[in-house]
Amino acid sequence: MKKTTMRKKRCDPHFPELMEQWHDQKISRREFVRYAALLGMSVVGACELTGLAAPKKALARENKIKRGGVLRVSTIIHSFDHPAKIAWSESTNIARQIGEYLTWTDKNNITRPYLLKNWEASPDLKTWTLNLRKGIKFNNNDHFTSDDVIFSLNQWLDPDVNSSMIGLMGGYLSRAGIEKTGNFQVRLHLNHPEIAVSEHLFHYPALILNHRTFEGDFIKAPHGTGPYAMDLFRKADLCRLKRREDYNPYWGTGADDRPLPYMDGIEFIHGGDGINAHVSALQNGTVDIVSGLSVNSMKLYNAVKNDSRIALKKVASAGAHILRMRVDLRPWNDNRVRTALKLCQHREKLWSLVDSSQGLLGQDFHVCPIHPEYCEKPTPAYDPEKSRSLLKEAGYGDGIHVDMTVTEDVARHADILKLDAARGGFHINVTSISKKRHMNEWKDPPLGITHWFGRPLGTIALNLGYAGDKQGMPVPWNETRWTDGEFDRHLKIANGTIDVEKRRRIFCKLERIQMERGSIGIAWWENSLMAMLKRVRDAEAHPTGHMLFNRVWLFR
């Protein structure tokens, strides 16, 4: 393979290492582009180095793109106040039309600058310099500066806010490590190396807040840098957004060089917990889009797949139904009982009956085959006899009665597991609760199934859901309360390892630990799905389920 000469101005200390891995065919060109982008190289520049075709700019299509109209989205409208505390993507799919992120991870899993112009990582990955775009205003006409970024970072890391961002960033960044180095520059001094800072800045609660007006409730002061402003919000009913006023236009421009967005507004319409209202609204034309986030993806797929008026968009994701057990409560504090239940997952059966159009089989660790660090492991077989043996060893020779709490969208999964687990000695009483109740109680049940949306890196999912904090206590989103010192040590090393092969070897250990003594079961990984009327143009499914409608337009 012909070696590529690196230009001096791009010669970050890590880039030669990445180039060597690419030349030795240890990573693909796309993996090189992805990791180079994480370190701050432009996607175009990284593509040039490898000869990979760079993403094409949108062509001017003013004769095709139509401005105006209101997009109607069927969703679930949860109440929320502080964006950093949001635990449900439906809420951020509303908020992100108003507020924005410092970075954006696209559907190809490549992270790009968004409110940032660019970023730079030090050779030891412990100092990250964030350079902000200039000339951006919030929708209330305040200027976007480094003060807003610092304020937002401090909110994320405030224990009293209790944001999931603490689990993601709190292990390597403290508020004392945030430095203002200019009106449009912020420097982060990390406690230990971290490769994925730029991706963490796209975690969905990480919206940038207006430090002048935010007092804990975004609905009362919905001031963001995004293309839309909030006009009305009624929980469990309607959220209406309108295009920003012409006197204070959005900073982004469209294919015609005029300010985005193309549409006049967006209406998010509450469709309830069940699927029927969402599908009926789409089929009778009273809404334009239904997301698989808001309803069971398989049911949505089956309901509309043969409707010629509807377009289905899907993309591979690391989203999954997580069978989770609280290790701080009996009987789940006994790993033999946890392992026994995991052995009662008939994965192929669950995959075919619950989600047959999508996904890949899982292996009881929260790392997906689409994650770059994934270390291939054999898929555990359904083994009810071994389950009974383990239960007997744990003192449950006659089997065990347990309660499971689920929502309607995972009820079929629970019912199938209940039948298969009966052969393994489990007598499961399944209780179904509303999504509204689940939203407030999702971490409480001893046994349940939680729908986790995909993350672009395995480290992100593991840091969010299974890590311990500096005191060894579960981080805010650790719903199973499972922590493991060996696991945390390996995860910390993986966070700061850029060499893909070394990183994957560490993940082989992390995955083994979670398989052998962890607190979750993952039978399969699903795709991210959106269904829309064909008049909706340039809307794409995203691996994390994120909706962004900056460039969406309506054919009329």
Image (spheres, grey):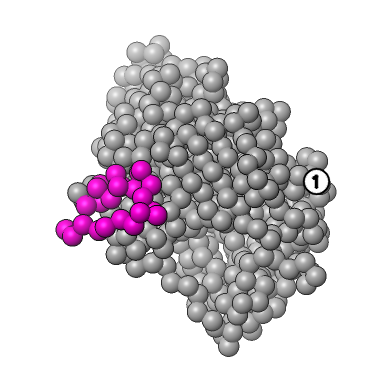
As drawn, is 118 to the left or to the right of 491? Answer: right
Query: Which residue is outermost to the bottom?
Result: 63
Look at the numbered disc 1 and give the secondary structure of its residue: loop
517 drawn magenta: no
Q: Which residue matches tag 1?
A: 212
> In the drawing, does residue 473 fall left or right of residue 520?
right
The residue lying toward the viewer, choosing from 328 and 412, is 328
Name the quarter where the C terminus is drawn.
bottom right
Q: Can residue 235 be seen in this view?
A: yes
- Residue at horizontal 60 percent and vertical 74 percent from the top: 254
| In the foreground, 127 or 357 | 127
Residue 172 coordinates in the image, percent (x, y): 52, 30
Residue pictured at 36% horizontal, 43% vertical: 13
Residue drawn at point x = 70 percent, y = 78 percent:
68
Residue drawn where x is 65% and y is 71% of the image: 260
Region of the chain picked out in magenta, as a range: 1-23
Report the amino acid beneath label 1: Arg
